[in-house]
């Protein structure tokens, strides 16, 4: 608890422009960022051009570009970091696919959080589906992002989104059903 409070204090100081707070903060969160990156990289099936350490470095650079952000707490920080990691991986997958235009892509089936990032090409399908979901139900898209890409628990997501755990569970269940439908191959293919 004291560590979480200390991290929140450092995040809030950094958010107001205190560069020294960032210098103290980053070594404290590096291991968790590395674990988060490793979790993302496990789903890349050997096609990755980034390593977990490089993903953490890229994320760090993107975090540095965030100006005057009002950090809520540790969960908020890791949710933003996970979103940045997702963007980096999606951009890398798009760059790989741009190099090999015309390669056939397979749709993936959604089976809880781990199936969402099953392969690099599939990550693009998931990202497109999440963007469509975001366009008409932003909260459900956030729940998927926080659950899958940040690895947050239902209670942590509830705190980040300021909703009840039951709402998160309902959103997660409905978003999964919608994504399964969106990511399933069309009949006859």
Image (cartoon, rainbow, N blue to C red):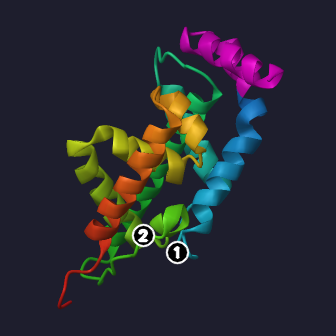
* SS assignment for the magenta stretch, majority: helix
Tell me the residue at 76%/43% (across/down).
31
- Earlier-in-chain disc, 1 versus 2: 1
Label 2 Cα neighbours within 10 Å, binned few <14 / some 14-19 / many ≥20: many
Q: Which residues are magenta?
A: 1-25
Query: In this view, which residue lies farthest toward the bottom?
Result: 188
Residue 87 seen: no
Work out how far the residue at label 1 is from the one at label 2, CA to CA, in angstroms: 20 Å
- Toward the viewer: 165 or 106? 165
Residue 101 percent location from the top left of the image:
26, 77
Q: Is residue 70 left or right of residue 20?
A: left
84 or 116: nearer the viewer: 116
- The numbered mark at residue 47 is 1
Examine the rendering and report whether any part of residue 95 can be seen: yes
Mark 1 element type: loop
Numbered marks: total? 2
Residue 54 versus residue 136 in the image, above or below = below
Q: Position of residue 126 (x, y in %)?
A: 36, 62
SS for dot 2: loop
């Amino acid at each position: 608890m004291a560590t979480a409070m200390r991290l929140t204090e450092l995040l809030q100081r950094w958010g107001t422009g205190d560069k020294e707070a960032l210098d103290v903060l980053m070594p404290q969160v590096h291991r968790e960022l590395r674990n988060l990156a490793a979790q993302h990289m496990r789903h890349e099936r050997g096609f990755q051009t980034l390593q977990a350490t490089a993903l953490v470095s890229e994320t760090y650079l993107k975090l540095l570009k965030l100006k005057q952000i009002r950090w809520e707490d540790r969960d908020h920080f890791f949710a933003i970091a996970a979103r940045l990691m997702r963007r980096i991986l999606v951009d890398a997958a798009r760059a790989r696919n741009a190099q090999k235009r015309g390669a056939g892509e397979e749709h993936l089936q959604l089976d809880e959080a781990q199936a969402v990032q099953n392969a690099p090409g599939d990550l693009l399908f998931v990202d497109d589906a999440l963007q469509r979901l975001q366009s008409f139900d932003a909260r459900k898209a956030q729940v998927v992002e926080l659950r899958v890409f940040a690895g947050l628990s239902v209670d942590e997501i509830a705190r980040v989104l300021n909703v009840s755990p039951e709402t998160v569970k309902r959103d997660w269940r409905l978003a999964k059903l919608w994504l399964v439908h969106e990511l399933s191959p069309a009949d006859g293919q």
